[in-house]
Image (cartoon, grey):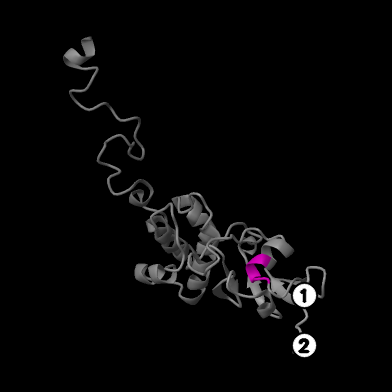
């Protein structure tokens, strides 16, 4: 009769591994079957990395492993011994938000925010490799990250703006980016330096309409 394999129980032996997380050396002991996603959230308390499909299809759980985006739901924690992991918790620095985080906030590129950590880290890896990407290159780099809220255009614009800031340019979002292509068609938005716009000619308050 063949020998039976030993089963690891929750209270059985667990490997203790050392690796770098957001620039700090950590040691964690966990069950060998755990994914990096589970280790980060359950063993290290880094819940900024989100559970998504857990099938490698949505990009929500993306983190950086040795500087490259990976889907943490598909990477075993055991594979990370001696390696560098970066999560969203490590993205801001001593001077404040990373330019990508600021651009996402300024342009409304994050709405419900659930997918945002994966987008930010994937975009960070892109800009570190390519400081001046085209729109098509941004679209390609982020193609594995799904968003249900924004329609992606704001995300692409935010990455472009952050890239300009990181290159040292004094870039500002255009009014079209903030308000849309038809922002000036209504005539209701004030022009810079003006007071509240006057009502259009023939509206209520003039002629017969104003006497009612």
Residue 89 screen position, x and y as percent? 64, 61
Query: The C terminus is located in which quarter?
Result: top left
Crowd class of label 1 (few under 14; some 14 to 19; many from 20; radius 10 Å)? few
Residue at 51%, 70% (x, y): give it: 56
**What residue is shown with label 2?**
3
Residue 114 screen position, x and y as percent? 53, 54
Crowd class of label 2 (few under 14; some 14 to 19; many from 20; radius 10 Å)? few
Query: The N terminus is located in which quarter?
Result: bottom right
Residue 5 screen position, x and y as percent? 75, 83
Residue at 66%, 76% (x, y): give it: 84
The segment highlighted magenta reads 34-38
Element carrying mark 2: loop
Element carrying mark 1: loop
Residue at 55%, 73% (x, y): give it: 70
| Quarter residue 73 falls in | bottom right
**What residue is shown with label 1?**
8
| Quarter residue 86 falls in | bottom right
| Quarter residue 156 falls in | bottom left
State how far apart marks 2 and 1 are (Cα).
16 Å
Q: Image height check: is 96 above or below 30? A: above
Q: Image height check: is 169 above or below 2? A: above
- Residue 169 seen by the camera: no
Say whether residue 196 is left or right of residue 212. right
């Amino acid at each position: 009769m063949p020998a039976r394999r030993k089963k690891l129980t929750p209270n059985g032996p667990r490997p203790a591994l050392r690796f770098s997380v957001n620039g700090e050396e950590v040691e964690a002991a966990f069950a060998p079957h755990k994914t990096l996603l589970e280790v980060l959230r359950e063993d290290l308390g880094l819940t900024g990395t989100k559970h998504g499909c857990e099938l490698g299809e949505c990009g929500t759980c993306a983190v950086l492993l040795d500087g490259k985006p990976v889907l943490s739901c598909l990477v075993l924690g055991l594979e990370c011994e001696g390696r560098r992991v970066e999560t969203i918790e490590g993205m801001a620095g001593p001077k404040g938000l990373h330019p990508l985080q600021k651009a996402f906030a300024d342009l409304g590129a994050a709405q419900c925010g659930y997918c945002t950590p994966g987008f930010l880290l994937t975009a960070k890896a892109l800009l570190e490799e390519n400081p001046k990407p085209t729109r098509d290159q941004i679209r390609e780099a982020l193609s594995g990250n799904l968003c249900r809220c924004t329609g992606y255009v704001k995300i692409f614009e935010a990455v472009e703006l952050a890239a300009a800031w990181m290159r040292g340019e004094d870039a500002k979002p255009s009014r079209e980016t903030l308000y849309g292509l038809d922002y000036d068609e209504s005539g209701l938005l004030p022009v810079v330096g003006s007071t509240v716009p006057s009502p259009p000619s023939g509206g209520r308050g003039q002629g017969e309409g104003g006497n009612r």
